[in-house]
Image (cartoon, rainbow, N blue to C red):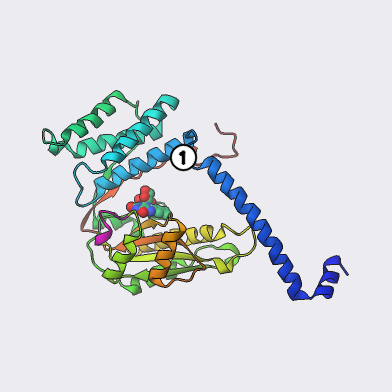
Amino acid sequence: MTLKDRLITLIGYNRAWEIRSRLSVCGLVLACWSDFHRYRRHAYIGFGKRSRKNLRALIMKDAHRVEKGLSLAGMRPFFGERMIGHLQMLIGCYVERYGYDFYADCGLLSLRRYVGAHDAFRGQSGYEKISLVEAFCDTHRSPGFGTRVGVDTLSREEFFECADASFAQFVAGRRSVRDFSGKRIAQDTIRQAAALAQRFPSVCNRQSVELYYYNEPARVREILRLQNGNRGFGETLGGVAVITAIADEFEGVGERNQPYVDGGMFLMNFLLALHSLKVGACALNWSVGPGRDRQLKKLLGLDDGLVVISLVGVGEVSERLKIACSPRKPLGDVYRGDGTIA
Ligand SMILES: Cc1cc2nc3c(=O)[nH]c(=O)nc-3n(C[C@H](O)[C@H](O)[C@H](O)COP(=O)(O)O)c2cc1C
């Protein structure tokens, strides 16, 4: 008889289980403490000096915000003044420290597209701000890295051409849509997409996800009011899905972040499934604090044990739509081989 067996005989299964659970809670506290420190050390939070990776991510984020603004059906002239200033500062810092590369190029090209989109306003009041951006671009001349930044304009047919093509064409053809007709997307369609997305791989096949879908306009508006990334297109969506993972179905310290992995896998499959069904979609971040999370759960009557992974705005794609290019990083910054590649 092992020591463990003897202990169980002595105190019983339930008491032994309780002790084991308490020990796991101690382990969980230590693991969260370590997670906290890693995040504090590496993510861009607080006042420390920004690392190269911090800066390049911030540039990508702002460059994408510019593209996104340019891709909206009713582009707001002179939009994002503060963000444009912030982006110039980031590019300035980055180039000063590291010189020109793909990331600086992305930032600069997005500024150039921004200036280009305001051509019609030349000479009008307010254009002085655009001239300053133009001057910034002129003093920061990147040698060019073949980066494609800005907006593509396609017809609905062109956009979905790849839906029945090879896998490579299909994945390249799926893109976030922010240009919708406003038509409501039926529960049945989303149910179909959920059925396809169910083929996602999950840890020990636990499939610990739940998808909620709302298409009643007043409800959609209430949900979108709690989300910060749908300005300029939220009102044209035909419904909103809420992707969640079920915390109750994970175990122990090691699985504390697993809901995000499994939920993220399901999210990806769901986006691809929607594309195959010719439904336009845009994931909508749920990067919020606990208060906002509670608000959403209260609004929708969601169980506290659900981890909200992301929202997804869905809709009928406009007849003719603009799409942000969302340039990809150089492959070498993603595929690192065995780690010996510089
Ligand atoms: C989890 C997640 C959250 C996102 N949140 C938003 C958002 O709030 N608003 C938005 O317009 N786009 C959002 N996006 C879309 C990204 O901007 C987009 O996926 C990225 O630029 C790549 O472009 P692509 O989807 O066209 O390939 C999100 C994407 C993901 C995966």
Q: Is residue 121 left or right of residue 144?
A: left
Relative image position of residue 209 (x, y in whole percent): 49, 67
Question: Residue, x 44% and y 27% (percent of image)?
Answer: 98
The vertical placement of 342 against 255, above or below, is: above
- Disc 1, SS: helix
- Of residues 285 and 238, the one nearer the viewer is 285
Residue 232 in magenta?
A: yes
- Does residue 173 appear anywhere in the picture? no
Callout 1 environment at 10 Å: few (<14), some (14 to 19), or many (20+)?
Answer: few
Relative image position of residue 314 (x, y in whole percent): 32, 63
Write the start and end of the magenta stretch as one range: 230-235
Question: Residue, x 61% and y 59% (percent of image)?
Answer: 255
- Of residues 247 and 119, the one nearer the viewer is 247
Q: Is residue 199 left or right of residue 313?
A: right
Toward the right, the furthest residue is: 1
Image quadrant containing the C terminus: top right
- Residue flagged by tag 1: what amino acid is it? Leu
Question: Residue, x 29% and y 39% (percent of image)?
Answer: 82
- Of residues 195 and 87, the one nearer the viewer is 87
